[in-house]
């Protein structure tokens, strides 16, 4: 037994040590001679051995205490002596971190001191970083060697980034590492104050960073008096983490993770709101204890005859309804409440009674009186509701088949015999339904309980549908460019020569005309600029003509159409603009030629669907078809198709831009006389060059607007 007691004592001591968390309650600085200094850290309980490290640039000394917390009223302690400017106290990840901002790297050691620790260091001689030393150095130096006054601390820049785990990261660049930010949190709002810091006018702004998908929605940088203030607003429970390295201050904002299992357990856990009471009984009758609770709470508690037995309990300051549940669970009982009456009985007895009640209800449904009722459907389709009612019924049922035929023909109400099958639908096995398409009425024959269910269904679904107005702007921009350069060379010799034997011949005329360039941008003769040169003899029998022709044409076109259409929620809307091209099918045998039409148009199909948060989700189909008459087959042009299909979510009244239907063509051609056109320089007189370019772009702007329910025509 000795070893067992020793183990229990050791375990109790360990648990007590773990339970007693070490809290930092004080920090004191003591300055010694020859640059020595000691920083005393006082804790409520002895903490564990700390981890520590030192940085040289900038000089920092970092000390970590695992499992410790801070009870100081400030997160920053200013000293400005013994080479120590200030101490930043941070808590993160279950540890306490102290960051000592020094003026130079030092040799240090950590020593335990009762419930705390001491950090002792010694500075290098000759370092004049103290305010007094600095003042002496300045006064003793010549006026010509005075150092320039330091610039006022200010914010150099600010940037926002998204972390690897989805956290928002705000990076602030400072002008000096001595700037000490102060972080405060209020709900979904964080405030970082930079004391005595100037914020440039270019950085005074409000930034919306919702598109980064982080817990941060926006942040604002502004100047408040002599301080620069960074205000961060987010969503949910924010978990900020701030740290500073030299002149860079980083604020990371993450969202507090919630345990879905704990939330579900909290929701399922019963909530007690009764007045608190204290009970202390031994071997008391359960029925008597229920009477005590009834007198205390003012509720009428009815106990079944099978409620017997005794119970011993001691409850202190417990809500009376929780005390009742504890008693029922201890004795295998259960309760049912109706108003201010609570019926208590054994769990099995209550289950048997509820089972008997359910069987009686089913018996009433199976043998109850059938009633036929007509329902006027206002905003829905009677045929669709009919399909909902008979869903799950056996397809082979005679009643279902008969009703379907009557509904299609617009039949009158009829109480057809229900066929057998599953009762997965709202109707009972004896119920039937039919509908009339002309009057959009639904006729249901069933017991009263099932008719009540049908009434509740119609009340929920036969409501005016939301409507959406879709405004579309269709912009088609076309740019054409054409250029043609050519020369016309003519020669003629009108003299008649003899070949002998009475044969005569003449030379000419010879003309090198312009070639025709088949391009998108047609150049007419009237568009040419001409320069002509003619050389001829005195008798005008021989001449040489040279004509230079230049032409260039540029065209820009823009076609804008603004159709507007209104449609119901989840109903497709279509806009079509274009032509129908006739296609002639040649005769075959005894069949005469026939003509059919194919559509070459711009089609826009939009199916809006309203989301619960008031936005509009649109399934969009954009199709642009045109006839290409340059590649006809038997005189019939082929249809060139371009199609875009997408699914977007837009704010109510917002605009989405659909592009990508882009086409660009460029052609270059050259028409020349063989051999002569290839000659250098002179060959330009025997050839034509043409260039044509065309660019077409189609853009569609869609703006959905939800029609308000209270919209009325006045």
Image (cartoon, helix red, strand yellow):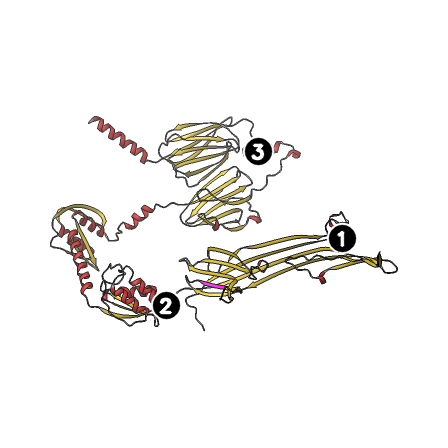
User: Does the segment drawn in magenta span residue 573?
Assistant: yes
Label 3, residues with CA under 10 Å away: few <14, some 14-19, many ≥20: few
Label 1, residues with CA under 10 Å away: few <14, some 14-19, many ≥20: many
Q: Quadrant of the C terminus?
A: bottom left
Q: Quadrant of the N terminus?
A: top left
The residue lying at 41 percent from left, 57 percent from top is 613
CA distance for labels 1 and 2: 79 Å
Vertical comparison of 567 with 112: above or below: below
Label 2, residues with CA under 10 Å away: few <14, some 14-19, many ≥20: few
* Magenta region, residue range: 570-575
Q: Which residue is mark 1?
A: 685
Q: Which residue is mark 2?
A: 379
Question: Residue 85's x, y, as percent?
Answer: 50, 35
- Please say whether residue 585 is visible from this viewpoint: no
The residue lying at 57 percent from left, 47 percent from top is 200
Please indicate whether residue 565 sits to the left or right of residue 115 in the image: right
Comparing labels 3 and 1, the label whose residue is closer to the camera: 1
Question: Residue 407's x, y, as percent?
Answer: 31, 68
Vertical comparison of 7 with 242: above or below: above
Closer to the chain start, of discs 1 and 2, is 2
Q: Which residue is mark 3?
A: 134
> Which residue occupies the extreme front position in the image?
501
Question: Residue 81's x, y, as percent?
Answer: 50, 33
Question: Residue 119's x, y, as percent?
Answer: 44, 29
Closer to the chain start, of discs 3 and 1, is 3
User: Does the segment drawn in magenta span residue 706?
Assistant: no
Of the pair 417 and 220, the residue shown nearer to us? 417
CA distance for labels 2 and 3: 86 Å
Of the pair 134 and 521, the residue shown nearer to us? 521
- Please say whether residue 692 is visible from this viewpoint: yes
Closer to the chain start, of discs 2 and 3, is 3
Of the pair 633 and 495, the residue shown nearer to us? 495
């Amino acid at each position: 037994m000795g070893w067992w007691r020793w183990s229990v004592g050791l375990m109790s001591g360990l648990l007590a040590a773990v339970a007693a968390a070490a809290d930092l309650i004080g920090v004191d600085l003591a300055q010694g001679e020859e640059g020595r200094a000691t920083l005393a850290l006082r804790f409520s309980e002895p903490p564990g051995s700390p981890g520590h490290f030192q940085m040289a640039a900038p000089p920092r000394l970092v000390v970590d205490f695992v499992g410790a917390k801070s009870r100081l009223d400030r997160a920053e302690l200013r000293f400005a002596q013994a080479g120590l400017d200030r101490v930043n106290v941070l808590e993160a990840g279950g540890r306490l971190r102290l960051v000592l901002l020094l003026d130079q790297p030092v040799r240090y050691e950590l020593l335990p001191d009762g419930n705390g620790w001491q950090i002792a260091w010694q500075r290098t001689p000759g370092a004049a970083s103290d305010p007094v030393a600095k003042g002496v150095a300045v006064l003793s130096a010549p006026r010509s060697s005075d150092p320039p006054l330091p610039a006022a601390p200010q914010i150099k820049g600010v940037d926002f980034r998204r972390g690897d785990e989805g956290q928002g990261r705000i990076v602030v660049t400072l002008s000096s590492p001595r700037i000490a930010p102060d972080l405060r949190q209020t709900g979904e709002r964080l405030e970082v104050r930079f004391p005595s810091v100037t914020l440039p006018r270019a950085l005074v702004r409000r930034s919306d960073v919702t598109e980064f998908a982080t817990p941060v929605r926006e942040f604002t940088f502004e100047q408040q008096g002599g301080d620069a203030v960074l205000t961060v607003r987010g969503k949910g429970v924010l978990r900020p983490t701030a740290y500073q390295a030299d002149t860079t201050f980083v604020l990371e904002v993450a969202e507090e993770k919630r345990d879905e299992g704990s939330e579900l357990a909290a929701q399922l856990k019963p909530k007690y709101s009764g007045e608190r009471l204290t009970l202390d009984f031994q071997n008391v009758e359960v029925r008597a204890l229920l009477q005590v609770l009834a007198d205390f709470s003012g509720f009428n508690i009815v106990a079944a005859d099978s409620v017997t037995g005794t119970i011993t309990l001691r409850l202190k300051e417990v809500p009376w309804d929780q005390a009742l549940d504890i008693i029922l669970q201890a004795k295998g009982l259960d309760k049912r409440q109706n108003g201010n009456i609570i019926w208590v009985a054994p769990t099995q007895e209550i289950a048997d009674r509820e089972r008997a009640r359910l069987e009686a209800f089913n018996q009433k449904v199976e043998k109850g009186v059938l009633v036929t009722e007509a329902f006027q459907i206002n905003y829905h389709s009677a045929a669709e509701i009919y399909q909902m009612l008979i869903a799950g019924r056996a397809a082979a049922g005679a009643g279902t088949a008969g009703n379907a035929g009557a509904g299609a023909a617009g039949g009158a109400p009829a109480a057809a015999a229900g066929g057998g099958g599953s009762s997965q639908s709202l109707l009972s096995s004896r119920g039937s339904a039919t509908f009339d398409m002309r009057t959009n009425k639904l006729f249901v024959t069933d017991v009263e309980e099932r008719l009540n269910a049908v009434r509740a269904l119609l009340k929920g679904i036969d409501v005016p549908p939301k409507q959406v107005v879709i405004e579309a702007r269709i912009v088609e921009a076309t740019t054409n460019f054409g250029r043609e350069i050519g020369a016309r060379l003519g020669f003629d010799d009108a003299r008649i020569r003899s070949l002998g034997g009475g044969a005569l011949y003449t030379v000419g005329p010879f003309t090198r005309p312009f070639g025709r360039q088949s391009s998108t941008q047609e150049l007419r003769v009237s568009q040419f600029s001409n320069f002509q040169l003619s050389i001829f003899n005195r008798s005008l029998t021989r001449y040489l003509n040279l004509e230079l022709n230049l032409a260039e044409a540029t065209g820009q076109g823009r076609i804008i159409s603004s159709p507007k259409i209104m449609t119901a929620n989840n109903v497709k809307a279509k806009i079509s603009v274009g032509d129908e091209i006739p296609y002639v099918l040649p005769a075959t045998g005894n069949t005469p030629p026939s003509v059919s039409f194919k559509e070459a148009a711009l089609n826009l199909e939009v199916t809006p669907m309203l989301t619960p948060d008031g936005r509009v989700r649109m399934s969009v189909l954009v199709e642009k078809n045109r006839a290409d008459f340059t590649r006809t087959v038997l005189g019939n042009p082929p249809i060139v198709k371009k199609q875009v299909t997408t699914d977007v979510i837009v704010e109510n009244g917002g605009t989405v831009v659909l592009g990508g239907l882009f086409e660009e063509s460029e052609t270059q051609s050259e028409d020349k006389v063989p051999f002569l056109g290839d000659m250098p320089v002179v060959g330009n007189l025997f050839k034509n060059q043409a260039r044509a370019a065309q660019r077409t772009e189609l853009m569609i702007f869609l703006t959905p607007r939800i029609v308000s329910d209270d919209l009325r025509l006045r």
